[in-house]
Image (spheres, rainbow, N blue to C red):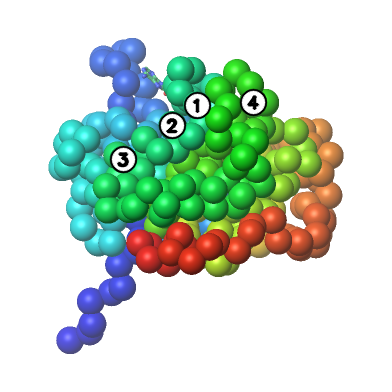
Amino acid sequence: MSLAPQSALLEARELTRVFGQGSQAVRAVDRVSFTVQPGEIVSIVGESGSGKSTLARLLLRLLEPTSGQIFLDGQDITKLRGARALRPYWRRVQGVFQDPFAAFNQFYSVGRVLMKTLDLLDGAKLSREERQDRMETVLRNVGLDPVDVLPKWPHQLSGGQLQRVMIARALMVEPAILIADEATSMLDASLRVTILNLLRDLRDRYRMSILFITHDIGQAYYVSDRILVMYRGELVEQGPVETVLGAPQHPYTRQLMADVPRLHGWGAVSMAEPAGAAIGTGSVVAAPSQGAGHAGLA
Ligand SMILES: Nc1ncnc2c1ncn2[C@@H]1O[C@H](COP(=O)(O)OP(=O)(O)O)[C@@H](O)[C@H]1O
Ligand SMILES: [Mg+2]
């Protein structure tokens, strides 16, 4: 007999979410199936309203699926309910969303937000010094100065800084996979490139997987190994970046590509050159201090 196949890190199987009933029903996510392997960056591309955020919330178990299943390391986690049961899952699967202002408690300083994340997850096992060390490391990893931002309140930070704090928060627990839903949409072009390079660096260094959700096929091209194209709740096309964008099969994919030069100057540049060449390959990630690396938990 053959060996059991190596299970994917994350798998969605026929995942479906319907909002409303009867003639009002919207199939926001419709029988979506795909896998993410360890160390892989997979993009989900689709226009506004195609179901991307609903899919992200389903995968993060923030929203109940109507039907279908989610597997982590081959284990069906679809039946897990409640924060207590889901905590081990969230230790491995973290999300970053588009609007950092909405995600950030206005009354908590950056330091408190990061500290609370450790409390919620595995912080109890860490000493005070280890917690402090990990906070400083993740902030430096996203290009922020810990001394500067730790005492600050959300309103004292720019949207770009706040988004980086949100990414740092997700990295605090050293997840196996990061689900980034339009996480770079609010950033200006140069900061966006910095964050995209950061994501690739995290993958290279720690084999962290990333599900990168965007409406912007240029960013998807730049950052990912594989692209899934979502249209009206369904995955209409998927495959390696070169295959999908080099020879798009679905009319919707062709339409998305046609929009690129009009949407983003640098998106058009990155479409024309191999990933990495357009922007330069300088590392933006500082080396993690001992004891705070991702390898330990991932
Ligand atoms: N909580 C909700 N209640 C009802 N409809 C929703 C809800 N969330 C999303 N939808 C609908 O599901 C569809 C997909 O939305 P969304 O997942 O936000 O798409 P995207 O992130 O790709 O813009 C849209 O038609 C949207 O109106
Ligand atoms: Mg969305």
Q: Residues within 10 Å of mark 1 (few under 14, many from 20)?
A: some
Q: Mark 3 sits on what residue?
A: 119
- Are circles 3 and 4 on residues that touch, CB within 8 Å? no
Q: Earlier in the sequence, mark 1 or mark 4?
A: 1
Give the spatial CA distance, label 3 vs label 4: 24 Å
* Element at label 2: helix
Q: Callout 4, which amino acid? A: Leu
Q: Nearer the viewer, mark 2 or mark 4?
A: 2
Q: Is residue 278 left or right of residue 243?
A: right
* Closer-to-camera residue (131/140): 131
Confirm whether residue 215 shows in the render: no
Q: Callout 1, which amino acid? A: Ser
Q: Quadrant of residue 200?
A: bottom right
Q: Earlier in the sequence, mark 3 or mark 2?
A: 2
Q: Mark 2 sits on what residue?
A: 112
Give the spatial CA distance, label 3 vs label 1: 15 Å
* Closer-to-camera residue (3/233): 3
Q: Mark 4 sits on what residue?
A: 157
Q: Mark 1 sits on what residue?
A: 109
Q: Is mark 3 within 8 Å of ligand 2?
A: no
- Are circles 2 and 1 on residues that touch, CB within 8 Å? yes
Q: Earlier in the sequence, mark 3 or mark 4?
A: 3
Confirm whether residue 101 shows in the render: yes
Quadrant position of the N terminus in the picture: bottom left
Q: Callout 3, which amino acid? A: Asp
